[in-house]
Amino acid sequence: MRTSLNNIAQTEAYLLKRANPANSLLFEAKMLLDQDLQIRVSQQQQVYSLIQQYGRKQVKAEIEAVHQQLFNQPEHLSFRQKIARLFK
């Protein structure tokens, strides 16, 4: 179990560019020699991409909710007017 966590930590450091150059070079050499490692690194990169996309969707949804509140609810009329004046 500990070895698996260490492998994940090394892969994460490599993918997120947190490893020092010597460790990155060593990790790349290991990947050249170990096809399973190449696959695990690719899979972990895909997971990071999915997490990033999900995070972006969440932020967009939150921004849209705030936009709807500010620009559609009557209690925010003065705010809408101020914003409109800024862009005239």
Image (tube, rainbow, N blue to C red):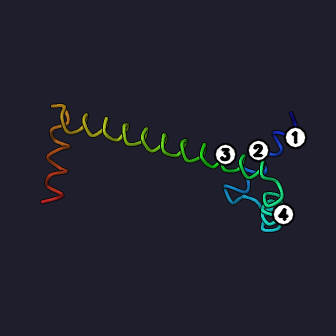
Q: Which mark is residue 3?
A: 1
> What amino acid is found at the position of numbered circle 2 in the picture?
Ile
Q: Are marks 3 and 2 in contact (CB under 8 Å)?
A: yes
Q: Which mark is residue 26?
A: 4
Left or right placement of residue 82 versus residue 15 in this view: left
Of mark 2 and mark 4, the one earlier in the sequence is: 2
Q: Residue at x 35, y 41 (%)?
A: 63
State how far apart marks 3 and 1 are (Cα): 16 Å
Q: Secondary structure at mark 1?
A: helix
Q: Secondary structure at mark 3?
A: helix
For mark 3, what is the residue?
A: 44
State how far apart marks 2 and 4 are (Cα): 15 Å
State how far apart marks 1 and 4 are (Cα): 17 Å
Left or right placement of residue 22 versus residue 41 in this view: right
Of mark 3 and mark 1, the one earlier in the sequence is: 1
Of mark 1 and mark 2, the one earlier in the sequence is: 1
Across and down, in percent, residue 36 comes to 78, 47
> What amino acid is found at the position of numbered circle 4 in the picture?
Leu
**Vertical placement of 87 versus 4: above or below?**
below
> What amino acid is found at the position of numbered circle 3 in the picture?
Gln
Across and down, in percent, residue 71 comes to 20, 39
For mark 2, what is the residue?
A: 8
Front position in the image: 16 or 78: 16
State how far apart marks 3 and 2 are (Cα): 8 Å
Left or right placement of residue 48 versus residue 17 in this view: left
> What amino acid is found at the position of numbered circle 1 in the picture?
Thr
